[in-house]
Image (cartoon, rainbow, N blue to C red):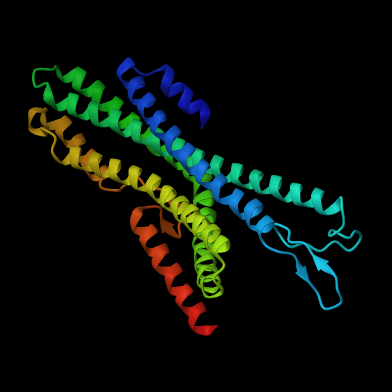
């Protein structure tokens, strides 16, 4: 993937490089915001929440100090010093490792999607340039048409390779986000009844974090889908009548090919788009309502 992106950069014009740079800046901002949101929510959950909750005293007068992730070790007593402090720090650090992996996964998806969007825009410019010049010789038109078909196949191949990597990332992120949003929503309802202010604030922070993460991933897929629709619209509005009859037939073939949208999928179970985000939120709220009624 990185080799393909590097080759596209080396063999592109200065105008195309400017387009790649703009897309890279957009991706950098989005990944930074997503990473900041993940780290903020994770810090609140793994640090602030266990430190602000009081210890649990059992009937046999044993005090249980709260850990970020409740754990049981058969060979050591995690409640005594220094084992408690060591385990606490390790759990916090492991959480930050998980958030780093999540942020990197979003960055990979953003890189694949935005680079594909840049390639699609370059393809649209090639198509417009082909049909806007009516006095071009037939040999030049034939050469440009072959270049366009080859470039379109190159985009399809790049997206197919990227899809093999991103489909599992998007599925795990969306599935994980939907489940956590449902469970955290239930935790908010329970803690609201107990009037636990700190826990409610932390839960709302986590709820915002995972909702925003799901929205970011779905927005990435929506960007690619919108750009693919723009390509289809560009093909449908080309001045094909300016071309010789033989070359105009190839333009019709491009129109047919562009009607098959380029999109990201989550292991071919669902499309990654804003409509999917809406469905995920509806499903999460539906399961939350079931949990509330059952308990």
Establish if 118 lies above or below 280. Answer: above
**Rendered residue at 51%/41% (across/down):** 36
Query: Which sits in the foreground, 143 or 199?
Result: 199
In this figure, what is the number of numbered marks? 0
Residue at coordinates 45% horizontally, 60% vertically from top-left? 269
Relative side of 85 to 33, left or right: right
Relative to 225, does residue 269 appear above or below in the rendering?
below
Judge whether residue 267 can be spotted in this image: no
Q: Nearer the viewer, residue 95 or 270?
A: 95
Task: State the residue at coordinates (40%, 51%).
Answer: 218
Q: Is residue 192 above or below residue 265?
A: below
Q: Residue at x 15, y 31 (%)?
A: 246
Residue furthest to the right: 75
Outermost residue, bottom side: 294
Q: Is residue 250 visible?
A: yes
Picture coordinates of residue 237, whole percent (x, y): 13, 38
Residue 105 image-quadrant placement: top right
Residue 193 horizontal/vertical position (percent): 52, 75
- Quarter holding residue 134: top left
- Determine whether, in the image, residue 101 is placed left or right of residue 251: right
Quarter of the figure that contains the C terminus: bottom right
- Residue 50: x, y in percent? 68, 58
- The percent coordinates of residue 18 (x first, y second) are 34, 21
């Amino acid at each position: 993937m990185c080799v393909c992106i590097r080759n596209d950069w080396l063999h592109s014009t200065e105008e195309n490089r400017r387009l790649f740079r703009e897309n890279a800046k957009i991706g950098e901002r989005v990944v930074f915001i997503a990473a900041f949101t993940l780290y903020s929510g994770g810090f609140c959950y793994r640090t602030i929440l266990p430190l602000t909750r009081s210890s649990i005293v059992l009937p046999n007068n044993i005090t249980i100090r709260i850990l970020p992730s409740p754990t049981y070790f058969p060979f050591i007593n995690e409640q005594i010093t220094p084992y408690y402090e060591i385990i606490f720090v390790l759990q916090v650090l492991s959480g930050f490792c998980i958030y780093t992996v999540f942020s990197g996964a979003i960055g990979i998806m953003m890189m694949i999607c935005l680079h594909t969007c840049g390639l699609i825009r370059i393809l649209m410019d090639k198509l417009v340039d082909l049909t806007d010049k009516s006095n071009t010789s037939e040999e030049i038109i034939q050469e440009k048409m072959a270049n366009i078909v080859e470039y379109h196949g190159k985009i399809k191949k790049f997206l197919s390779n990227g899809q093999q990597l991103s489909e599992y990332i998007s599925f795990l992120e969306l599935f994980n986000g939907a489940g956590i949003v449902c469970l955290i929503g239930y935790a908010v309802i329970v803690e609201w009844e107990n009037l636990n202010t700190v826990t409610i604030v932390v839960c709302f922070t986590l709820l915002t974090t995972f909702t925003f993460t799901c929205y970011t991933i779905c927005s990435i897929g929506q960007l690619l889908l919108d750009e693919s629709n723009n390509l289809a619209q560009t093909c449908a509005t080309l001045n094909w009548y300016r071309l010789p009859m033989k070359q105009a037939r190839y333009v019709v073939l491009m129109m047919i090919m562009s009607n098959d949208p380029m999109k990201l999928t989550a292991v071919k179970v669902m499309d990654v788009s804003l409509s999917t985000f809406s469905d995920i939120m509806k499903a999460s709220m539906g399961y939350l309502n079931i949990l509330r009624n059952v308990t």
